[in-house]
Image: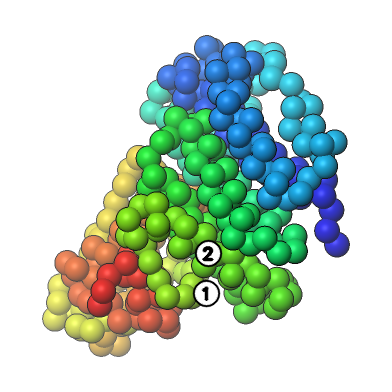
Amino acid sequence: MYSETTTARGIFGALWGIVELGAVIAAEGDLSAVLLAPFVATRRAELDRLLADVQQIGDFEPETMAIFEAPGWERGDVQETIAYLMLYSEVGGASLNVDDPAVVARMVSVGADRQLTALLNALVSAAAAQRGGRDRRVGLITEAMRSAGQVLGRTDERLLEEVFRGWAGDHLASALSSTSPVPEATKACLRDYAQAIEEAVTSTVGGAYTAAALYPTTWGAVCELPDGRWETTWDLTLATPLREAAGADDIDVHQDETIGFRAVLKPDAKRGQARLRVVTDEPAMSAVYFPATFTAFGILNDQVAQIETIQGLPRGWYAPFRTRQS
């Protein structure tokens, strides 16, 4: 059953995270220098535009919109800032060294990806709960996301495309899966919004990410490893048998130590088949890992052996191949 307050809190939760992370970015990673109230004051114009868009997207009452400002913008001390940074990035642990600028930078990067993706999901959910006005709401959603990016100091148009891809591969893919409890009517509405947002995003970035339809892809098999890391296994079929293409040994496909990502291709006993094993430091479905995963697909296809299917589905259903002509 639809609840205006619950729907709005989903949006505001992501926005609170974006404001917190934006303040850390503005303080250049010095957690002792993070001051929320002055930061909010400097970003008031962007926040006001964003909130005006949010109110129209969800047709929220003024009393509901007041929830956003209710917590206030005062902070007790640096420990409170650290706690919120861990909450919004979901990066933590007893051994976490927040005095290391590289650690803080990683938390901010992961947190920004998470909260922007969560914001888009909450905005689409709010819009889908309303009747009519899809095109108008899609325009408001893209403007709201652009304002959210500005709060984080991001003004590049590619941000919208990156967030859309992360959302489509995570929240949307989960909602559209055959095992999802989401009603078919809601799935159709989400698919409709996704297609319209995709078209809006590609129109602002020169049409670099266009597709005739949004395909409900399947993510790889995910499990948590004993050491706390995460593993995702992708089943692939290749046009060229792997043994002929690159030998029988495991192949390092792509690695990014800054986000804790490594993709290794493992040959299969059957000709033309292989498994891509992706190991990540953080939960496998974190938005920060979607671009790295798609990069690994591209490297594998272009430099090792051409991919025919991923998880039993056509290669062209997945990024980066949806952007290619053939």
What x and y, as percent, mark residue 248?
19, 75
CA neighbours of label 1 inside 10 A, class few (<14), some (14 to 19), many (20+): some
- Residue drawn at (77%, 36%), measured in percent from left and top? 65
Q: Secondary structure at mark 1?
A: loop
Q: Quadrant of residue 237?
A: bottom left
- Residue drawn at (83%, 58%), measured in percent from left and top? 2
Q: Secondary structure at mark 2?
A: helix
- Residue drawn at (51%, 23%), measured in percent from left and top? 24
Question: Along the line of sight, which residue is nearer the eye, 63 or 79?
Answer: 63
CA neighbours of label 2 inside 10 A, class few (<14), some (14 to 19), many (20+): some
What x and y, as percent, mark residue 76?
69, 14
Q: Nearer the viewer, mark 2 or mark 1?
A: 2
Tally the marks. Answer: 2
User: Is residue 275 in view?
Assistant: yes
User: Is residue 294 in view?
Assistant: no
Question: Along the line of sight, which residue is nearer the eye, 3 or 227?
Answer: 3
Quadrant that contains the C terminus? bottom left
Sequence order check, earlier mark of 2 and 1: 2
Return the mark for residue 216: 1
